Structures are given as structure tokens and as C-alpha cells.
Amino acid sequence: MFHSVRLEFNRGIMWTLVLVLLMGIVEMNISQHYTPFQWLSHLRGRRQNAGWQSEVVDCPLECDCPTAYPTAMYCHSRNLQHVPYVPSHIKYVYLQRNQITGIQDGVFDNATNLLWVILSHNQLSSDKISDSIFVKLESLDRLYLDHNELNRVPRNMPRSITDLRLSYNKITKISSKSFEGMSNLTTLQLQANVIEEVEGGFKELKSLNMLDMTKNKLRRIPNSLPERLQQLYLEYNNIESVPAGFLTMYPDLQFVRLAHNTLTDKGLPSSVFNTSTLVELDLSFNNLEKIPLVNRNLENLYLHANKIKEFSLSSFCDTVDGTNFSKLKVLRLDANKISARDIPAEAAYCLRLVSFIDV
Ligand SMILES: *[C@@H]1O[C@H](CO)[C@@H](O)[C@H](O)[C@H]1NC(C)=O
Ligand SMILES: *[C@@H]1O[C@H](CO)[C@@H](O)[C@H](O)[C@H]1NC(C)=O
Ligand SMILES: *[C@@H]1O[C@H](CO)[C@@H](O)[C@H](O)[C@H]1NC(C)=O
Ligand SMILES: *[C@@H]1O[C@H](CO)[C@@H](O)[C@H](O)[C@H]1NC(C)=O
């Protein structure tokens, strides 16, 4: 009895901590009541109040290390041009929204306990980051390098990372060595780069379940994706086709987004989307003239802004009877070449969970 109460209590503390840590990333909504400067002085004030303790805290002058969260170092949004030295007891370092262009060698060498390094929204360039900069961070869990000027994937990233953000950079290619050995990576964000070429770099990512390559220059779907992938986001590329059997190769895929590409009917093999695991399929803003055949288990289908001319009920149900019907809940067909009159009355039996078809 006492045991479980204590467990709940610990869990409460844990969630509070996670919340505080996350607030460091989202720029602290609390601060909207203060000007940025006031928020800074608020933090400093707290440290002074801590009296003799503040002298014990090893913290770079540029940053704040609140005594309440002794393993966090807050250095975001203060015009820094370099990474301050990170003391060895720090686990979470927030450096986002500065003007950092490079990372000097050795700056993380003593901080081998680091779990999160947040460097989003800076001006980091690849040639100002040495190949061994992250090597010693053997416990690193999150590395955020999004919104920088990187033109390649940093080398020798710790294999312990689970969440890697490289979106909004200038990366042109993924090589077979880009993510070598990163078998614990679960989330990989690469959106808004200029990636044209993927040379097998994803295969080793055994734990990856989310890959976001929205807004790149891909002309086809990368051909060796992680086996256990669940979410694949490829909107805003130049993809013309989906290879035959594509979804059977990745049996865990549940969410596939291919909106804003150049897909045509010819590029979609006849049963390519007929797999029972798929939950959401977004094919909006392409050049399709027909509704592709989808599995009865699909729940969300987005086909708006294509050139679809006819409503084919057989795309959803081959036979319609009392027990067999589509699980589709959301169907968007607006901005095509059909109107509500083109939808046959029988559709109501097959698409009985769809409350409203956008046409
Ligand atoms: C790193 O840690 C060692 C050993 O604790 C210490 O002697 C050294 O001064 C630290 N490095 C820096 C740059 O503070
Ligand atoms: C991957 O995660 C497992 C379980 O959390 C851990 O035991 C292992 O050391 C991690 N691998 C690396 C390379 O950090
Ligand atoms: C679609 O897949 C189901 C199995 O999930 C199968 O029974 C059905 O025949 C397939 N439809 C077509 C047209 O291939
Ligand atoms: C429903 O469809 C499945 C496979 O598509 C089939 O095995 C089953 O017999 C059908 N049920 C009825 C009542 O027609």
C-alpha cells in the first residue's frame, strides 16, 4: 500500500522534471509575461538567493544553472557566438537561438554525462565541427541540430542517441555511413534540407519508427528504409512513383504521407496500398486521376487537390455486405474533378464510418 503511494509520488516528480526540461526547449512559455531581459534577471536573482550554494555550482558566466535543477544548463537566446565550457555534472544543455557558428574542440570532453544537447536555431556549419566532437558523449539521448547551416550529417555521432534532429539545414546527401551503428535511434528529422541522394544510410537503424524527409529533393522513395518504420513523411519532394510491393517490405508502416509530389496513376502499382496495417495515407496535391485501391483497414485517406475524375467504390470495398465494410473515417476528395453527384448511393454501405466526404 505505502509502496504504491510512493511510486505515484516518484512518478509525479519525474513528470515534473520532464516538463521542466521540455520547457527549456520550447522557449519557456512562462516568459511571455516578461521581456526576455526580465526573465534572465529572474533566473539570476534566484541564484543569488541561494547564497553560499551558488558558489558551489560550477556554471559558465554566460549561462544559468538553477539550483533547483542542478544538472541543467540554460544558455539559450543570449547572442552567444561559441559554446561555453560544459561542466562534468551537466546532463541537459540548452544552447538554442544563439549565433553559434562552430563547436570548439574539447568543449564537451568533461561532460560525459550529457543526455541532451540542444543547439537548434544557430548558424553551425559543417566545417566548423570536428569529426570527434560528440564521440565521448556515450550516454547522449537527444541531439538537436535543426535550423543551422550544416551541409552534411555530422560524423561519429554517439550510438546511444534516440532522437536526432537535423531538419532545416543544407544537407545534400545521406551516405551508407551517415548513421552507422545508431541502433537505438527512434526518431530522425531531416525535413527541409536539399537531399537528393540516399545511399543506403538508413538500413542499420533497427529501432527507427519515425523518419521525416519532408521538403527535400527526392525523386524516389529511398530504397532501403528501416524494417520497423511506422511513420514515413515524404511530403514536398519530386517523387513520381511507389515501387511494387513497397508496403509489404515494411510491414509496420502505419502512416505514409506523400502529399505535394508528382505521383501519377502510372506510378502506383495496382495493389500497392492494399496492406492491412496502414492507418493513414496522404496522397493529396499530386496528379492522380483515379482513386487507388486501399485496404478496408485504412482510416484516413487524403486525396484532395488531384485530378480525380470518377468515384470508384471498388477502391474501398470489393463486395458490400452487412459485415464487410471499410474502416475509413476521413476521406477528402475536394479540389478534384468530381462532385457529390458522382458518389453512388451504395457508398453509404461501404463507407459507413465516414461521416462526411469532402468533395
Ligand atoms: C576537466 O576535468 C578535469 C578533471 O576533473 C579537470 O582537471 C579539468 O580542469 C577539466 N577541464 C576543464 C576545461 O575545466
Ligand atoms: C541502446 O539502448 C539499450 C536499452 O536502453 C541500452 O542498454 C544500450 O546500451 C543502448 N545502446 C547504445 C549503443 O547506447
Ligand atoms: C487486398 O488485401 C486483402 C487482404 O488484406 C485481400 O483479401 C484482397 O483480395 C486484396 N484486394 C486486392 C484487389 O488485391
Ligand atoms: C469478408 O471479407 C473477408 C475477406 O475479404 C472474407 O473472408 C469473409 O468471408 C467476408 N465476410 C462476408 C460475410 O462476406
Image (cartoon, grey):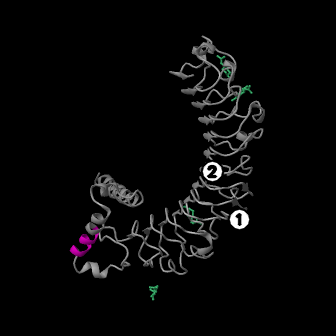
**Quarter assignment of residue 52:** bottom left
Ligand 2 located in image quadrant: bottom right
As rendered, which of 335 and 274 lies closer to the eye? 335
Q: Residue furthest top?
A: 345
Question: Which residue is found at the position 44% from the left and 78% from the top?
Answer: 88
Q: Check disc 1 and give the amino acid type.
A: Lys
The residue wearing badge 2 is: 213
State which mark lies toward you, 1 or 2: 2
Question: Which residue is found at the position 48% from the left and 80% from the top?
Answer: 110
Ligand 2 is within 8 Å of the C-beta of the residue at disc 2: no
The residue wearing badge 1 is: 177
Which secondary structure type mostly characterizes the magenta part of the structure? helix
The secondary element bearing badge 1 is classed as: loop
Give the extent of the magenta segment. Answer: 43-49
As rendered, which of 153 and 329 lies closer to the eye? 153
Dot label at residue 332: none
